[in-house]
Amino acid sequence: MSDFEKLTPVRKTNDGEISLWEIMAVLVRRRGTVVVITLFVSALAAVYALVQPLTYTTSAAFRPQGSEQGGNSQLAALAGQLGVNVGGGGGADEASPQFYQELLVSREILTSVSDEPFAVHEVGILKLKDLLEIDEDSEALRDEEVLEWLRTEAVSVSTSRETGTVTVSVKTEWPDLSVKIAEELLTEVALFNMDTRQSQAASERVFIETRVEEAEANLEEAEGNLRSFLETNRQWENSPMLTFQHDGLRREVGLRQSVLTTMVQSYEQARITEVRDTPVITVLQSPFFPPLNDPRRLVFMTVLGAMIGGMIGIMLAFVSEAIRRPRTGDPARAEFEESWDAAVRGVPLLGDRGD
């Protein structure tokens, strides 16, 4: 052992600071401890990176289209003059990004995804409950496990208030499965929108059809009143009171005719909407195939482990140095030092220990 490595107490300089040379001397003497701890922790980090299952993430983005309510609002404004409610609200909420954020992780959508068989490379065509090898007593419990896995681990959804964009991300252990689940989610959302809109359009058509019949009856009644008035009062132009009644009856007929015309137009529009199959979402980014295993992950984990191990090793080196430094008049400390020395001597490569 060189004179530099001989055990010397850490001394303080005149200004009370510990000498840098003394710190370096401690590190040199305890270099074995630092090196072994560093290598051990970095090896653990590398093993963790190797045994940890790889995951592959893909994402897709879309923007919901705004609901079209121009015709309905015109109908509602005109028919409201007669106390007729033709509906037509609620479309804005259904077109909001927040609505789709909840829809994508809803039970209905995720159940449709879990029931779909997926073709996975080198695995086969399997449903998710078979692919994940979920072992439960009943099929119902297996299905619930799949839904929980999709909701909490595989699928995540975010929205942007500025752009109104909905982004769905899918993370699994199979890159092609991540892509297929993301595509299936977009398909299910499109089908849900189409079915919902067509169902709403059918209900609206039936509703307006009933209102059209009522409007026709009201128009026929107003025309009958005007006809009866003219038959009864053939000289109505000579009486101001009869002229006033005549003008009121004509206005009533005109208003009823306008309501009927608007409702017939809305009825035809509802029939068109009922069979229309255009999408109500605009896909901005289709699911992409995620990159395969990145070797930089192993390098990063190893370097991180080496840094953490180095810090732990340096800390243990100074702790060991402080424990080994003799203190007179302290039997308990001397007993602890003997126990520490015995434990350290049992571990190889912990450095030369000068006594």
Image (cartoon, rainbow, N blue to C red):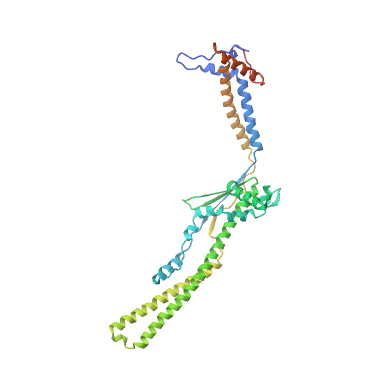
Q: Quadrant of the C terminus?
A: top right
Identify the image quadrant of residue 336: top right
In the image, residue 76 above or below residue 325: below
Q: Is residue 229 visible?
A: yes
In the image, residue 261 above or below residue 169: below
Q: Position of residue 28 (x, y in %)?
A: 59, 18
The front one of 163 and 79 is 79
| Relative side of 98 to 226, left or right | right
Q: Position of residue 121 (x, y in %)?
A: 69, 49
Q: In the image, what residue occupies the spot 50% across and 16% down?
A: 19
Q: In the image, what residue occupies the spot 57% across and 62% down?
A: 195
The front one of 156 and 120 is 156
Q: Quadrant of the N terminus?
A: top right
Identify the image quadrant of residue 111: bottom right
In the image, residue 247 above or below residue 5: below
| Relative side of 278 to 253, left or right | right
Q: Position of residue 43 (x, y in %)?
A: 65, 30
Q: Is residue 264 visible?
A: no
In the image, residue 161 above or below residue 50: below
Q: How many marks?
A: 0
Q: Position of residue 320 (x, y in %)?
A: 58, 19
| Relative side of 255 to 59, left or right | left
Q: In the image, what residue occupies the spot 31% across and 86% down?
A: 236
